[in-house]
Amino acid sequence: MSSPTYSLLGLWPVINRWKSLVLGALLLALLVSTAVALLLPNIYKSTTVFYPTNPQTTDPDRIVSEGGKLELGGRSEDLDRVITIGESQPVAERLIKRFKLHEHYKAGAAGDDAADQAALDEFSSNLKIVHNDRDAIELTFEDKDKVLAARIANALVQSIDSVNQQLTLANRVKVLELYAQRRNFLEREYQSTYDSLRVGRRRYGIYGLALESRYLAKEIIETEEELRRAEGEGNSSKAAGLRRALRGLTKTDGGNIFNLESYSAGIDQMNTLFARFNDLQARLLGARSAYETARVGISGRISSIYVVQEAYPATKKSKPVRWLIVASSLVITFALSVAFITLIELYRGNLSMGRTK
């Protein structure tokens, strides 16, 4: 004998024979699912939307010194960086501690490894950070307390902003140290060159006055002419005075501070010192300005994100959908019941065939 076959249309007689069992299972599923759906707490979610910015455009050094403009992000590296920071464990642990979520999640006492991990897992499961199709970041947090959900979402954005700023802060501190080292070095060199310049001026009598060499040459020529004229006229007393004046203008032992011998001996060295002094002076002024700009910049805090929408307490729950829980449990129970009674019918059919043989 061939074994009996069953089709979907043929299930109705089977269900009808087992209707008491099926109805009982459906009733039980209705009661249980309704009770479970009613006992489940309402979950609220709060969402904040923001754009990341390019860290280079939020660097105070650039903004102060170069007049840079704040540019919204949208670059893949900026978006990935923000999402990575938001999903990082240090940020999560900071907020868990700040909002005392161990108690809120009933995870146990803080400091216990199992409790810390449970709170961290619960926090991570309630957090969702995605990159939407408009190149913005949507950060959503869910919780039974709608006010707490909004507070945590906004605090998360602030933490992301803070960590994002720290990425450039360490480099800016190092740059400030380099500016300070450069300024200190130039100040030492400036003072050393200035001291050398003072010594050289006293030694050679060269003070860098305008047309200094021209006036010295003119005075020597005129004095020498007067000397020759006095000698030609036989005026010995005037000639003696002019010789002393000419010696004073040409020899270092003549008594004149400004004389040709000292000038010739020191002019090259003093020109080098003058040039180095002027160069160091300009560089020192620039280094001091750069250091002051960097010091002002490092003390400023410019947000690295642009918040389009802050998170607000939700006006309605996001889950659970209670009618869906009840309906799905009834459908599943009905399907399992039909499968169960079908298996029983198949088993009984096989037994009857075996006895007939």
Image (cartoon, rainbow, N blue to C red):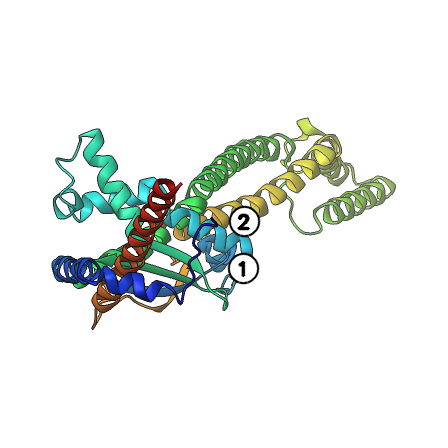
Do we see residue 353 in this rendering?
yes
Residue at image position (37%, 50%) is 86
Query: In what element is the residue under mark 2?
Result: helix
Q: Residue 170 at what x, y percent from top left?
A: 43, 40
Q: Give the vertical position of 250 relative to 133 (above or below).
A: above
Q: Which mark is residue 66?
A: 1
Q: Residue at x 31, y 57 (%)?
A: 338
Q: Nearer the viewer, residue 162 or 240?
A: 162
Q: Quadrant of residue 337?
A: bottom left
How many numbered tags mark residues here?
A: 2
Residue beneath disc 2: 286
Q: Is residue 292 visible?
A: no
Q: Is residue 146 left or right of residue 159?
A: left
Structural crowding at the residue carrying mark 1, measured as other residues with C-alpha within 10 Å and reported as few (<14), some (14–19) or many (≥20): few
> Which numbered disc, 2 or 1, marks the residue that appears first in the sequence?
1
Residue that appears at 49% across and 51% down = 80
> Along the line of sight, which residue is nearer the eye, 201 or 268?
268
Q: Dividing the image into 4 quarters, which one contains the C terminus? A: top left
